[in-house]
Image (cartoon, rainbow, N blue to C red):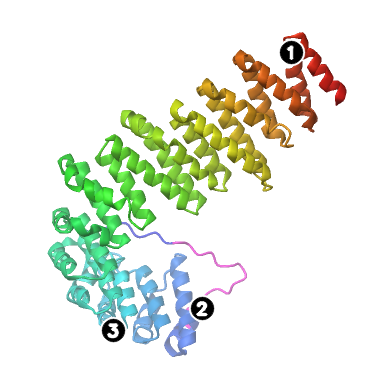
Amino acid sequence: MGEQPCYTLINFPTDSDPHNEMQLKLDLEKGDIKKKIEALKKVISIILSGEKIPGLLMIIIRFVLPLQDHTIKKLLLIFWEIVPKTTPDGKLMQEMILVCDAYRKDLQHPNEFLRGSTLRFLCKLKEPELLEPLMPTIRACLEHRHSYVRRNAVLAIFTIYRNFEFLIPDAPELVGAFLEGEQDMSCKRNAFLMLLHADQERALAYLAERLDHVHAFGDILQLVIVELIYKVCHANPSERSRFIRTVYGLLNAPSAAVRYEAAGTLVTLSCAPAAVKAAAACYIDLIVKESDNNVKLIVVGKLSALRAASGEAGARALPDLAMDVLRVLAASDLDVRRHTLHLALELLTSRHAEELVSTLRKEAARAQLADHDDAQKYRQLLVRAMHRAALKFPEVAGAVSPALLELLGDGAELAAADVLSYLRHALHAFPDQRPQVYAKLLECISSISVGKIVRSALWLLAEFADSADSARAALDVLAAA
């Protein structure tokens, strides 16, 4: 016997009245619709809390089950899901035969929502004895005029086939034939999903005939197709060349979810630089266009993982996208910007170093005008990014120093402290630039208003005054302050 399902325990308030079984029986038997609904809700809560009230089962079958009220129908689906259906020795209760007949009638009900809801409910049943008499009716629902009924019929068949294959052994053939003639995209998606898990060869044959038309499918079906391609190519690498063009095409799909999955699948099918670059470009486009910051962070993480995993192909293909990555800085979230700057610097090569510094310099100028809460922290990130760029590529230090000195007097203590940290490094490490940097620092020091920053700047002036002229210039600035 399988494990019993685990349900949520409902905690009744301490001031609530204890349930009265006789009153519940009375309400269920003789009450109006409103009272029956309230009584049924109480019965469901009692069962969910772990109590057993077997005396109400026949009352509900006799006086509630025949009702056509839709609210009662919905509540009954919950009730039949949670109520014990077997005797202590594991045999199906005789009363459930009556319930089974009610299921069958609901599956033939003219209301499509009621049919679909019943089909969804049947997916949760674990008693094959209850399902067996319903199989012809479930099959008939595949031909219903309403797509809501058809798509839930496919799910019901899929679940029953997975749990009790002997009840419908021809399910793959049945659903395969259904898929061939179906027009609704949600129904096709459910049917294809079943074949993906139940009969992969049949799903593959269906896809192979329609490879040139995948771009016209709905996004929900395209997602399942990408999943199938991934599974097939992972199990049989020789199939990669057959499907890679389709995956490339899905990088331009209207759905962001499809593009995301296609990009991830593409780099598993091919490690060529062109494939890595196409996937990375797709990720960048998704980050820029997606409004949800959590999604942006996920995709930035995916892009970082791609850089780490792509090896030689990534080293050849990804540096060209370093500047494209900076488009993500238009996001307002500080974490997104932090991860973006880190990634851009990881991708950076000497070929694009000067262009990156120029872009960061413009971004810092825009950040000076911003007045939101994270503006100072963002300027600090930009300063550190330019500092790292100068450390990695000393040839751009000449462009970094003037850019950072412009930020000294803007009143942002966090950024200014990092600017001075960089200037100390530049004055020490780049002797050929020392006169220009020192002169620029002399010009800027009078505009610094934060005492802590002034002290550090004065220390730099004193430490690196390596000639009489520079010492006199420093003293003149101090005298004028």
Near mark 3 (Cα within 10 A), the count class, few <14, some 14-19 or many ≥20, is some
Which residue is label 3 attached to? 109
Asked whether residue 349 is in view, the answer is no
Image check: 266 left or right of 300?
left
Image check: 405 left or right of 264?
right
Q: Which mark is residue 465?
A: 1
Quarter holding the N terminus is bottom left
Q: Which amino acid does the dot numbered 2 rest on?
A: Asn
Q: Which amino acid does the dot numbered 3 rest on?
A: His
Cα–Cα span, label 1 and label 3: 93 Å
Cα–Cα span, label 3 and label 2: 34 Å
Mark 3 vs 2: CB contact within 8 A = no
Front one among 304 and 28: 304
Front one among 231 and 363: 363
- Of the two numbered discs 1 and 3 in the rendering, the one whose residue sits closer to the viewer: 1
Q: Position of residue 447 (x, y in %)?
A: 78, 32
Which residue is label 2 attached to? 20
